[in-house]
Image (cartoon, rainbow, N blue to C red):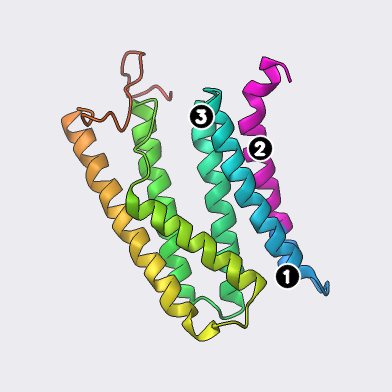
């Protein structure tokens, strides 16, 4: 594979993951005997491709501005869609789904503000990684095995929602501190754009 094609591979995989979102929903609500199983496999495929495009982007230094948008967008669209599907079956209470979706929307909005002024975003913190892993695991499990330990789903997803809110609080505090002081953390969680700052310019 030549360098030109490789350069676009991570973003191509992210677009592929976006395409998988409606396919997952269609299979989940289909009348196919194996529809739920196929939906679960699509969800797992999206997760594997998420790991793959991240590895390729880091391994070959192919991280791009577009990738910073497509990668989390594809990830969150799949997770939120799957959560809505599970909620329609009574596995997840609707109010937990609302919390998760609102958190993701606000986080993406905040990230876009930082990305407007910087060329990178605040990296995931411990609570964010833990919450994402737990939510992914729970969704995959209950899509494939909806009747196993169903009575405990509320508390498991509630724990994931709490971790997500803690993570969101950490992101928010760090983001506000960066914007107010216009100073990057010492570990360079975000990197300033090389171009002169211009509030009217979208990087």
CA separation, marks 2 and 3? 14 Å
The residue tagged 3 is 58
Region of the chain picked out in magenta, as a range: 1-23
For the point 62% across and 39% down, which residue is it?
14
Can residue 102 be seen? Answer: yes
Q: Residues within 10 Å of mark 3 (few under 14, many from 20)?
A: few
Q: Which residue is more in the foreground, 200 or 17?
A: 17
Question: In front: 93, or 141?
Answer: 141
Does residue 171 lie above or below 30 as drawn?
above
- Of all residues, the one furthest to the bottom in this rendering is 151
* Disc assigned to residue 13: 2
| Residue situated in front as seen by the camera: 104 or 10 | 10
Mark 2 element type: helix
Magenta stretch, main secondary structure class: helix
Residue 19's label in the rendered image is none
Residue that mark 1 sits on? 36
């Amino acid at each position: 594979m030549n360098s030109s094609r490789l350069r676009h591979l991570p973003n191509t995989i992210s677009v592929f993951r976006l395409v998988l979102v409606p396919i997952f929903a269609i299979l989940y609500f289909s009348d196919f005997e194996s529809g739920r199983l196929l939906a679960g496999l699509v969800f797992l495929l999206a997760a594997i491709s998420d790991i793959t495009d991240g590895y390729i982007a880091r391994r070959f230094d192919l991280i791009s501005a577009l990738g910073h948008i497509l990668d989390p967008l594809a990830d969150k669209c799949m997770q939120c869609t799957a959560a809505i599907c599970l909620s329609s079956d009574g596995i997840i209470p609707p109010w937990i789904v609302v919390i998760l979706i609102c958190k993701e929307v606000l986080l993406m909005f905040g990230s876009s503000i930082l990305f407007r002024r910087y060329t990178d975003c605040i990296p995931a913190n411990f609570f964010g990684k833990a919450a994402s892993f737990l939510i992914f695991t729970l969704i995959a499990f209950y899509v494939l095995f909806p009747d196993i330990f169903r009575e405990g789903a509320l508390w498991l997803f509630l724990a994931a929602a709490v971790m997500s809110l803690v993570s969101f609080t950490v992101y928010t505090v760090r983001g506000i501190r960066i914007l107010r002081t216009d100073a990057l953390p010492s570990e360079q969680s975000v990197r300033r754009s090389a171009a002169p700052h211009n509030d009217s310019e979208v990087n």
